Image (cartoon, rainbow, N blue to C red):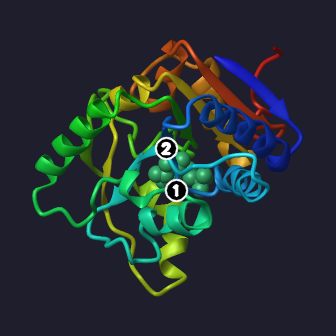
Amino acid sequence: MKVIVLNDPIEISKEAAEIIVKQVNNNKGSVLGFATGASPVETYKRIIEKYEQGEVSLKHITTFNLDEYVGLSRENVNSYFYFMKDNLFGKTDVNFDKVNFLSGEAEDTDAECKRYWNKIKESGGIDIQLLGIGTNGHIGFNEPGDKFADGPFVVKLTQSTIDSNKKYFEAVGDTMPEYALTMGIGDIMRARKIILIATGESKAKAVKALVEGQVTPECPASILQLHADVTVFLDKESASLLGDR
Ligand code: GLP
């Protein structure tokens, strides 16, 4: 695991965007795994800038997002589909036919999870998976528990995740769903390259467990220690509890 500590989210976004753009320019049909939340937003801005400057085209990429809330339609401002459209896809030449999402509106969630699993497999696998990390060490919506999940599944969100994310729902007078669909740890680990971004003091404990803790499903992100190609981008605050490196 490569750990890179930079000054601020802007510096991080430049490095992360550079890796992603390079991947796409080497292989226009790259398969990219994207994440939502505040952590990747600056990186998405840098990718949009590079697209606008003619440095990259996203026309031929295939995308898979990590997760989606159960019950939310794509038009709901708090759905992760909406987030991606608003923060990246809609501002570039991404082909929406190649955008893959777990559907929050699926009636048969097990069938939906199987469909997503097959789609990832048929795509040839994810070249780069971008990740944030929850304050409780979750990645995607793989919450702390007693085992690592392999493929996509339905998850009951923990109180800590609800406490972190409910502000976005309250802002528009909605209640946050208690369930979500998420890629499993296996899906994430099968990505050929992983980039994780964590900034701010609120992530410091989770980052310590990710980088220096035991590999345990109690901190789902800790399994990334076993992946051959992970780059973790931190700022000074999120790295503040790490030992000398
Ligand atoms: C959310 C998402 C994760 C994200 C994490 C951190 O709940 N499901 O994919 O990485 O929490 O979010 P943020 O970047 O806003 O801190």
Return the residue nearer the eye: 236 or 35.
35
Q: Is residue 219 visible?
A: no
Category of crowding for the residue at label 1, using alpha-carbon neighbours closer than 10 angstroms: few (below 14), some (14–19), many (at least 20): some
In the rendered structure, the answer to whether residue 92 lies left or right of residue 236 reads: left
With respect to residue 214, does 173 lie above or below?
below
The quadrant in which the C terminus is found is top right
- The dot on residue 94 is 1
Residue 132 falls in image quadrant: top right
Q: Amino acid at mark 1?
A: Val
In the rendered structure, the answer to whether residue 24 lies left or right of residue 136 reads: right
Category of crowding for the residue at label 2, using alpha-carbon neighbours closer than 10 angstroms: few (below 14), some (14–19), many (at least 20): some
With respect to residue 13, does 53 lie above or below?
below
Farthest bottom residue in view: 173
Q: Residue at x 55, y 67 (%)?
A: 90
Q: Amino acid at mark 2?
A: Ile
Return the residue nearer the eye: 98 or 194.
98
Q: Residue at x 49, y 37 (%)?
A: 29
x then y, percent, for residue 25: 65, 35
x then y, percent, for residue 172: 50, 85
Q: Secondary structure at mark 2?
A: loop
Q: Are marks 2 and 1 in contact (CB under 8 Å)?
A: yes
- The residue at which mark 2 appears reads as 61
Label 2, label 1: how far apart the Cα atoms are: 7 Å
x then y, percent, for residue 3: 73, 23
- The dot on residue 109 is none
